């Protein structure tokens, strides 16, 4: 304290007895025009302090001083006159200021005043950023059909990848003697995928048209990576089934055991109701844009898609393209390339897809597909129902941890609000990253998603394994439901359903075979988050896989009341 007191005592402004000496300026070049910028009390002093002035200049100095004083007096008189006028205006009767009320009355009736205010308030409340519709597109199909190449070409045509990057990938592909793979390198980013030429994990990218924002989900085509394909398709709104027109390749993918069949079946099961069947490699020397080959493929695919449950007239569209050269993708082909095709290009077909019905005011549901640490806990997923705002309080199920939404990211942009159907990264507080695993669901606090150990489901048995040809109680398989992957066991068969009448068969059932429809009770070892199919279709449909093969598809119909399970 003593140091502070000593240092502050030296300040001149604290000593009232000290007299501030006027500065000793030499105004040798002072002119009469400078008067208003010079304090009056300094003028005379300044002129007096200049003692050694030649006699010839003394008269000029006195003349200047006189002029300065006159100017200052004039300034003072002007200020006094202005002050007098202001007082007179204040004292004047209200009739003198009639124009002012007229202006005040007209302002609220200005045509732009009210709409501007309303327009300004809504984005504050629901600032979703870009107002265009958003669609998730999954590319599925047999291995080597050209899914990654088409994805890469889309990004290049929509200016999401620059020319220099493409040239770099061309050099890399040429060094590996895989000249035609360079477009796939845009989607296949890790070295294992590039070396083998096979997509392993679901690639994710974004592109835009004037009408729509798209998220590309590039699913792996190899049978070993079907679980990854399921996780990608479960997030999609529309599917692009890629088929190779090259002689022999279509037949390999479509025959028994080919991934064209399994992917189409899984896509329908996972809720992909709209399908674009893209016949790729039409530029191949074995095809050369042949209409006969295109019609042959369509004729074989349509009956199978009908058996999967697709309305082929309303929900399925066929397109011929060349993914490597970008033909019929962003722009329609010329007649010189393909004289018989009059339909849309790929971008037009995607833009024309109708959005699925979503409820922005429903209970919030966002299955989590990934999590990581970045200045807090960040989770990733797609909103299936409801909306989210920065600052919302939500619940992570099944561990019932209440969390607060800190930041919402859509693509690479930070937004204040997001609607259903959006793929998001959300930074949350209130839970540690290690306490969350893929398959958990971010949900509303007032109506959390049920977390169960058992549920009743209606199953459609597809094709059982040769050495396990009977489906009965005790059958074990891998359950895939939204982002959950969990081992499950069939606890019992409740009743079989007649495929013709769709009604339960009264006869007690002990086992079923391939092709049967049956209601069963399924048990898992750990709590999982599911919904009844009738309430939330996307969170109530699932597949059962055994030894790398899809054996059944199903939907959740009931939650039996069990002790120790937290369910609604």
Image (spheres, rainbow, N blue to C red):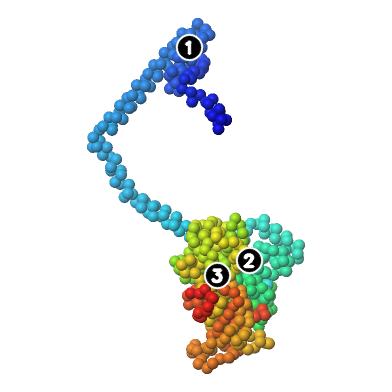
Q: Distance between the Cα atoms at labels 1 and 3? A: 91 Å
The residue pinned by badge 2 equals: 203
Q: Position of residue 431 (x, y in %)?
A: 57, 62
Q: Position of residue 272 (x, y in %)?
A: 54, 74
**Residue at 39 percent of width and 52 percent of height:** 116
The residue pinned by badge 3 equals: 398
Lower sequence index among marks 1 and 3: 1
Crowd class of label 2 (few under 14; some 14 to 19; many from 20; radius 10 Å): many
The residue pinned by badge 1 equals: 48
The reply to whether dot 3 and dot 2 touch (C-beta < 8 Å) is no
Indicate which label's residue lies in the foreground, 2 or 1. 1
- Please tell me whether mark 3 sits on a helix, a strand or a loop: loop
**Residue at 65 percent of width and 68 percent of height:** 201
Q: Position of residue 203 (x, y in %)?
A: 63, 66
**Residue at 47 percent of width and 14 percent of height:** 45
Q: Distance between the Cα atoms at labels 3 and 2? A: 28 Å
The reply to whether dot 2 and dot 1 touch (C-beta < 8 Å) is no
């Amino acid at each position: 304290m003593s140091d502070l007191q000593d240092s502050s005592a030296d300040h001149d402004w604290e000593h009232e007895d000290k007299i501030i000496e006027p500065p000793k300026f030499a105004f040798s070049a002072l002119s009469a025009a400078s008067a208003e910028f010079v304090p009056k009390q300094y003028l005379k002093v300044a002129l007096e302090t200049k003692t050694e002035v030649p006699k010839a200049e003394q008269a000029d100095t006195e003349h200047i001083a006189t002029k300065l004083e006159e100017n200052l007096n004039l300034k003072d008189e002007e200020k006094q006159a202005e002050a007098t006028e202001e007082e007179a205006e204040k004292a004047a009767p209200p009739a003198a200021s009639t124009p002012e009320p007229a202006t005040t009355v007209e302002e609220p009736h200005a045509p732009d005043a009210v709409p501007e205010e309303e327009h300004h308030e809504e984005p504050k409340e629901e600032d979703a950023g870009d107002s265009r519709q958003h669609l998730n597109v999954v590319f599925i199909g047999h291995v080597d059909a050209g899914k990654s190449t088409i994805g890469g070409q889309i990004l290049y045509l929509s200016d999401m990848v620059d020319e220099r990057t493409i040239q770099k990938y061309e050099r890399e592909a040429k060094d590996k003697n895989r000249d035609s793979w360079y477009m796939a390198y845009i989607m296949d980013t890790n070295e294992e995928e590039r070396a083998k030429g096979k997509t392993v994990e679901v690639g994710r990218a974004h592109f835009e048209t004037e009408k729509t924002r798209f998220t590309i989900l590039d699913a792996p085509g190899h049978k070993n990576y079907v679980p990854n394909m399921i996780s990608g398709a479960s997030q999609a709104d529309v599917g692009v089934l890629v088929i190779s027109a090259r002689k022999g390749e279509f037949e390999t993918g479509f025959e028994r055991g080919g991934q064209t069949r399994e992917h189409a079946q899984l896509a329908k099961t996972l809720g992909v109701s709209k399908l674009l069947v893209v016949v790729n490699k039409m530029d191949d020397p074995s095809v050369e844009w042949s209409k006969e080959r295109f019609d042959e493929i369509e004729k074989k695919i349509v009956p199978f898609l009908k058996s999967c449950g697709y309305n082929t007239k309303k929900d399925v569209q066929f397109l011929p393209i060349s993914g490597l050269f970008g033909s019929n993708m962003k722009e329609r082909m010329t007649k010189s390339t393909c004289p018989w095709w009059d339909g849309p290009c790929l971008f037009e077909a995607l833009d024309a897809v109708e959005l699925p019905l979503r409820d922005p005011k429903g209970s919030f549901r966002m299955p989590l597909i990934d999590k990581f640490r970045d200045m807090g806990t960040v989770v990733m997923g797609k909103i299936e129902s409801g909306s989210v705002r920065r600052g919302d309080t939500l619940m992570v199920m099944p561990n019932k941890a209440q969390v607060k939404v800190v930041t919402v990211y859509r693509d690479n942009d930070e937004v204040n609000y997001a609607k259903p159907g959006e793929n998001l990264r959300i930074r949350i507080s209130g839970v540690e990253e290690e306490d969350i695993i893929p398959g958990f669901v971010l949900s509303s606090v007032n109506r959390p998603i049920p977390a169960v150990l058992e549920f009743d489901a209606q199953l459609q048995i597809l094709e059982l394994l040769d050495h396990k040809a009977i489906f009965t109680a005790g059958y074990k398989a891998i359950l895939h439901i939204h982002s959950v992957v969990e081992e499950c066991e069939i606890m019992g068969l409740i009743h079989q359903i007649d495929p013709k009448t769709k009604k339960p068969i009264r006869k007690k059932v002990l086992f079923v075979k391939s092709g049967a429809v049956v209601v069963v009770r399924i048990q898992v070892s750990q709590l999982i988050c599911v919904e009844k199919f009738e309430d939330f279709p996307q969170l109530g449909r699932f597949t059962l896989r055994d030894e790398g093969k899809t054996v059944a598809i199903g939907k959740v119909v009931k939650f039996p009341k069990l002790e120790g399970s937290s369910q609604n």
